[in-house]
Amino acid sequence: MKKDFLSLTDLSLSEAECLLKRAAEFKALRRSSSSPQPLLGKSVAMIFLKSSTRTRVSFEVGIRELGGYPLVLSKDGTQMGRGEPLKDTARVLSGYVHGIVIRTAAHAEVEELARWATVPVINALTDRCHPCQVLADVFTLREQGLLQPGLRVAFIGDGSNNMVHSWILAAKLFGLHLMVACPRAFRPDPEVLASAGGAVTVVEDPKEAAAGAGVLYTDVWVSMGQEAQKSERRQVFQGFQINRELIRLAQPEVRIMHCLPAHRGEEITEDALEGPNSVVFAQAENRLHVQKAILEHLLGDRK
Ligand code: CP
Ligand code: NVA
């Protein structure tokens, strides 16, 4: 049976650990310029119905490095823009390609695509979650020697967005302790929160979350598709910012993380993003290595 990667819940802990280990191998092999090619002769459709820099480029380069052929599809350039249903697109593409990567707004659309496609489907971000990003983030912590049960991660900002939901699932899977600091009206989805049991605490005071944290994570106040709420959100999230004051409260070696793109002066200050504790560009690079491991796991012929 084909496997999809729509959410971190699609992975067991041992599968996730294998992917992280394999990503480290891909990273090391890339330095020695001899990438294995488990996707040789395979094509992967990449449907991007929202903007992207990191995800799109890292998948496209990763597919090529694995020996495969990536096709980037947009709404306007295809019949999806003229209303062809996803369930039809899923079946048509399954006749041509060996896997589908999709970024769209509604998580239900990705689930629908996966239901009808006969090839593996990978979620490249929905409004609900961003599993490839969080796996690359966890990989970044692992390579820094920080990934161990009980690690205190503080998420500061919009508690209701895709990155928080992904981190809640990661906290549960890897045994981390996640503290989310967010305004009351922007708390995580109660169902996702409940699924994590005691792994997650939600507070309203960023200082409470940051105190003693080993990781400070944030994401934009205004996610893609929320542009109409920009001014309201900029007001509500005032104070939910990673800055010098919060960094002082955290552990001395705290890692500053952000999935990017960042809005300096909103959710994070310039000096926090560019300072010595920041690992944001390692996170971005690691998208490539981790996604290669995911692609190989789902659609590769591993020799
Ligand atoms: N972090 C991330 O997914 O970035 P892009 O939107 O540029 O793909
Ligand atoms: N929460 C952000 C993440 C971007 C990678 C968004 O959805 O726009």
Image (cartoon, rainbow, N blue to C red):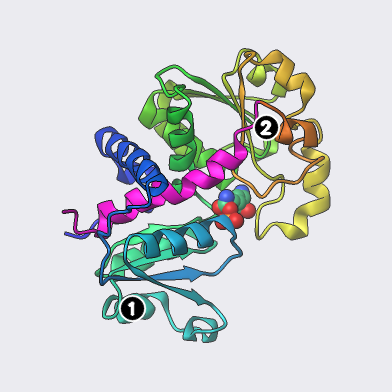
Against 255, residue 302 (above or below) is below
User: From this viewpoint, is residue 258 visible?
Assistant: no
Name the residue nearer the viewer: 173 or 64.
Answer: 64
Q: Nearer the viewer, residue 142 or 167?
A: 142
Measured as percent of width and height from the top left, residue 7 is found at 39, 48
Taking the spot 73% from the left edge, 15% from the top edge, the residue there is 248
Nearest to the observer: residue 3 or residue 280 = 280
Magenta segment's dominant SS is helix
Residue 203 seen from this side: yes
Under tag 2, what secondary structure? loop
On the image, numbered disc 2 is attached to which residue? 182
Outermost residue to the front: 32
**Mark 2 beta carbon near ligand 2 (under 8 Å):** no
| Quarter where residue 275 is shown | top right
Instruction: Classify the position of the C terminus by image quarter.
Output: bottom left
Callout 2, which amino acid? Cys
Q: Where is residue 44, by image quadrant? A: bottom left
**Disc 2, disc 1: CB below 8 Å?**
no
Q: Quadrant of ligand 1?
A: bottom right
Say which residue label 1 marks: 93
Vertical position of residue 189 compared to residue 156: above or below: below
Mark 2, Cα crowd under 10 Å, few <14 / some 14-19 / many 20+, is many
Magenta residues (range)? 277-303
Q: Position of residue 143 (x, y in %)?
A: 44, 30
Judge whether residue 5 is colored magenta.
no
Q: Label 1 sits on what residue type?
A: Leu
